[in-house]
Image (cartoon, rainbow, N blue to C red):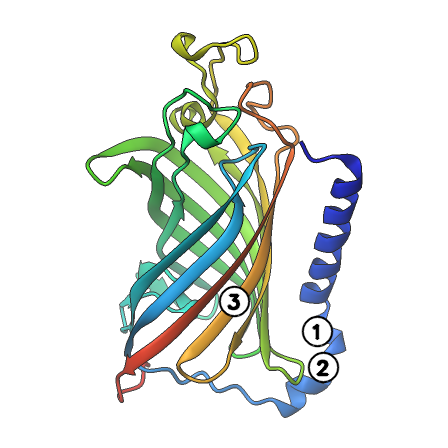
Amino acid sequence: MIHAPRLLTIHRFVFVLAFIACGFKDVCAEDEEVKPSNDIKPLWEVGVGAFAGWLPDYPAAGQNTVRALAVPYLVYRGDFWRVGGEENRGAVSGRFVKNEKFEFDVTLSAAFPVDSADNNARRDMPDLDFLFGIGPQLIFKLINEPGRRKLNLNLQARAVYATDFSSISRQGYVFNPKLSYTREHVSDLNLTVFTSAGPVFATEKLMDYFYQVEPEFVTPQRPAYDADGGYLGSDITLGVSKRFNNRFRAVLGTRLGIYSGATNRDSPLFKDKLNLGVFAAFAWSFAQSERPAR
């Protein structure tokens, strides 16, 4: 459980980061005058990326686990299809509609698997497999100043699947509207600051995956529970990234999950109303096209 002193520390930490992320408009006004935007990027690039984080096992879990992953990556910035890249939120997307006011494309999500033997609440229950989601996204560009700042309203809907890499099963759907803000060329360090916040709603099947307790898994501390679809919780993400040159970029961030009032707060697997995770990542591009993206 997260106790009161720690909650206060988390709230202060997130508040300070949010103030920094959202307050750069005035503090760094001088930077806007002197730092020109240089957004020319190659049409494609190949590299390697790594991710590490201390993350909750699942939404409203009572435990965090250290996760790490290193993978090769491909970025392609075509006129229609886009693969990876920070400007594409690391996703695969088709730019079905894109203009100065709104954009329609495809969004992806993923979550690490959980070994139930390592989680006190889920011990002797089935493991949680690797989750990934895919679905359409409509982006309303409330502020669109390329190379400086962006404020978007993202309306995301995704089908969610679980896999142990031998089979795939559908685990329902999520709807995740959120506001996202990005500020580029911040301070003399030339940082990019980003933040996003929004609620998550899920269908019953995904809620069952996280919170249902079938009769065969009942213990004196874990009564049976039938999960319902509805409000899963809300996420606030805050982070900063730095591009050291045209081939190397690093990211540092934190995510706060807020689950007060969640539909399945009475589940014995629902342990904390607040989850805090921290993460770091880097991407190194070792091959790039000479042709620039348009």
Q: Identify the element where label 1 is drawn.
A: helix
Asked whether the residues under the numbered discs 2 and 1 touch, taking CB atoms below 8 Å apart as contact, a structural biologist would say: yes
Q: Which mark is residue 207?
A: none
> Callout 2: helix, strand or loop?
helix
The residue at which mark 2 appears reads as 29
Closest to the camera, between mark 2 and mark 3, is 3
Q: Can residue 156 be seen in this view?
A: yes
User: Which residue in the structure is indicated by mark 3?
Assistant: 251
**Quadrant location of residue 98?**
bottom left
Image side of residue 194 versus residue 172, left or right: right
| Looking at the image, residue 155 lies above or below residue 172 | below
Q: Is 139 above or below relative to 227?
A: below
Circle 3: element type:
strand
Residue in view at x 38 percent, y 69 percent: 85
Q: Name the residue under label 1.
A: 25
Residue drawn at (47%, 14%) of the image = 226
Mark earlier in primary sequence (2, 3): 2
Relative height, residue 141 to residue 62 (above, below): below
Indicate the quadrant containing the C terminus: top left, top right, bottom left or bottom right.
bottom left
Q: Which amino acid does label 3 sit on?
A: Val
Q: Position of residue 144 (x, y in %)?
A: 54, 71
